[in-house]
Structures are given as structure tokens and as C-alpha cells.
Image (tube, grey):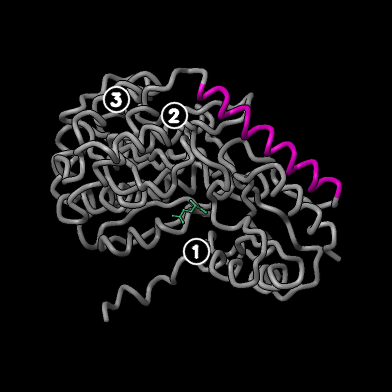
Amino acid sequence: LNKKIDQFSDSVIRRMTRIANKYEAINLSQGFPDFDPPEELKESLKEVAEGSIHQYSVTWGAQNFREALASKQSKFMGLDIDPEKEIVVTCGSTEAMMAAMMTVCSPGDKVVVFSPFYENYAADAILSGAEPIYVNLKPPEFNFDPKELEAALKQGVKALILCNPSNPSGKVFSRSELEIIAELVEKYDAFVITDEVYEHIVYPPYQHTYFASLPGMFKRTISCSSLSKTYSITGWRLGYLIAPAEIINGAKQIHDFLTVGAASPLQEAAVTALKFDEQYYQELEKKYEKKRDFFLKGLDEIGLKYTKPQGAYYIMVDISEFNFEDDLEFCEWMIKEVGVAAVPGSSFFKDDINHLIRFHYAKKKETLKKALARLEKLP
Ligand code: GLN
């Protein structure tokens, strides 16, 4: 078999979901909602099913979808995105990230990844022939040291991966942090590949700044995101890349051979969501803020220590006070004995950090309530 397979493991996040299902635990590991998408979106899917859009769309995305997406993202990103030349629609942001990496990296290139990181990035880098170089986001604050970042970029790095708002840490990079990154990628001429799937899940007073919107940065940024989290449709697998035309031309070519295209009926149905007004996004933010605060209050009552999320819907909880060999043993025990699943934090870190576990709270209030009641039984 391909030797690259030995360089990364299967997804621990998705493995935890399988174990959680086996033991019927409440699954706060793999991050996806247990509530439905907006009713209009389900209606729109029904209508599309009755119609005649059931064959391939243009490989880089259905016209209708790209136009609606360009208009929505132009507004939020403060850019003027060309739906013809600057977008590729992909099967989730998972494909977008893989395609982005394959578009810019040649074998042997180096890619900077902040650690802790969403586990796909290392696998994406390795599969595209690149070598990941890690820069620490130190818990509990998850800040980075600009000197360490510069030392990494100095090594002739091709691209930097930026997950903002960040999974698993819940960090939202401040504008000034992003400006430091911008200065360094300009200095060392590196691309930036963003994963901004939590762009609309940010808790006040924090604010999301799109990296591509910083002065001079559009030309070197590949912005990846998806509709999964914003509209609670993780199963629809609708993601995209936004970048300047020359990069997108390469990405179109890669994407064509990876998957041909995202599901055309789902793209058509999702146009409804892309046309939602401002109020939808405000309500989404409020809804998640309420979930976060409810979950944190529960953790406080139990006496668990954590880093308060600024964005996204994950929380890193400190388990050092428990007497376990490591986070993996703790998570397996918790699934079986407590009935709640989390992801061992070590699967997100490059270094041997195993005193943290990650919960997600994209769940109905009653699910969170049940999970908290079970967590109260922790020794
Ligand atoms: N982003 C989700 C998480 O971190 C999972 C996404 C996936 O499994 N594709 O849990």
C-alpha cells in the first residue's frame, strides 16, 4: 500500500463517533448538529427533487449556486468575488482544503500548520506530497509566538493553513494577530489556505476577520469554507474555494479529477439559504452563544476547567485532575461508564499533550442537558 498511509492515522474524531454509537453514548465528539436545517431549506430540497436538476452541473459548481455564493461572500468578506473566475464548489470544505493543498504544493514543499489543528490538515499536506511544519498555539490561551512562526516560514514554506475561528481551540484570531501573519507571509512569499467554516459562529465581543480581506492578501489567499455549519447541513457536503483566477484555474483542474463536482440538486436547493438575509446570521450567532453559555454553566457547576470558546462550537476541557493514563483512556472510559463521548485532545496536537479533551455543543438544549447530567457523575 501507499507508504503515505503510515504517516497518519484514521480520523480519531470519526472513530470516537463509531465507539459512541456502539455504546449508545451522547455524542459530543464529532461536531455536527442534532437539529434540522431551516424549514425553507428542506422545502427547497423537496421542490428540487420534483424538478429536473439531477445530472452533473458544471464541474466547478452550478451557475446559480456560484452566483448566489459570490453575492453572499462578497458582502461578508468585503470583496468583489467573480462567480465565473474566482470560485470552485467542492464536496464539503474537506475537499476544498485537499484541493487547495494540491493546487499550491509540489512534492517536498513545506506547509505551516498551527497546533492544535483539525486533524485533516496533516493528512491533506502529506497526501499532497508536502511536509507539515507545526507552530504552537499554546493552551490554555492558544496564542502563538510570532518568532516561532517566522522561524517556520523562513524554512521556505509554500503555504500556511489558517483555521479561523479555530477548531478545536475555539480561538478567533484577532485582527492584529492576522496582520502579523500577513506581514510574515508577504515577507516569505507563502500562500495562505484558510478554513473558515465557522465564519458565522463567533461570540461577541469577538469578530471574524476574513484573511483574504486584509490589505494585499487576496492575491495569496485561498479561502475555503462550506455551508455545513452555517445552515446545519453537514450531510449535504457543499463547500467551496475562493481565490484569484490563476489559482482557481489550477484548483478547477484538480477538483475535476478528484470528484467531478458537488451534488447538483443540493447546490440548487442551497441557493435558498445563500439568499437568507442578515437576520438569519444574527440569530445563528445568538443561538450558538446560548448553547455555549448553557454548556459552560454546566461545566462550571461540575467544576471542570476549560478555555472559553471565542468562536466555533468546540471546547477544550482540562482533565489533568483525573487519574488516568492519558486522554484516550479517559475518553474511552467516559463513553462506556459515563455515556458521553468527547475527542481526546492529543489527536489535535503535534506534541505529546494529553491533558485536554474536546467536547462540541452543536446540540439541542435537551441533549446538552442530558450530557451535563451524566457528566455530573464524573469522580
Ligand atoms: N469538523 C467536525 C469536527 O471537528 C467533523 C467534520 C468531519 O468529520 N468531517 O468534529
- Mark before the other along the chain sequence, 1 or 3: 1
Q: Secondary structure at mark 1?
A: helix
**Residue positioned 46% across, 27% down in the render:** 209
79 to the left or right of 60 = right
- Mark before the other along the chain sequence, 3 or 2: 2
The relative height of residue 286 versus residue 114 in the rendered view (above or below) is above
* Residue 135 screen position, x and y as percent: 48, 52
Amino acid marked by disc 2 = Glu
Q: Secondary structure at mark 2?
A: helix
Depth check, mark 3 against mark 2: the one in front is: 2
Q: Secondary structure at mark 3?
A: helix
Amino acid marked by disc 3 = Ala
Distance between the alpha carbons at the discs numbered 1 and 3: 32 Å
Closest to the observer, 143 or 365: 365
Determine which residue is flagged by label 2. 40
The answer to whether the beta carbon of the residue marked 1 is less than 8 Å from any atom of ligand 1 is yes
Was residue 296 drawn as part of the magenta stretch in this picture? yes
* Residue 87 screen position, x and y as percent: 23, 34
Determine which residue is flagged by label 3. 68
329 to the left or right of 147 = right
Q: Which residues are magenta?
A: 280-301
Quadrant housing the C terminus = bottom right
- Mark before the other along the chain sequence, 1 or 2: 1
360 to the left or right of 222 = right
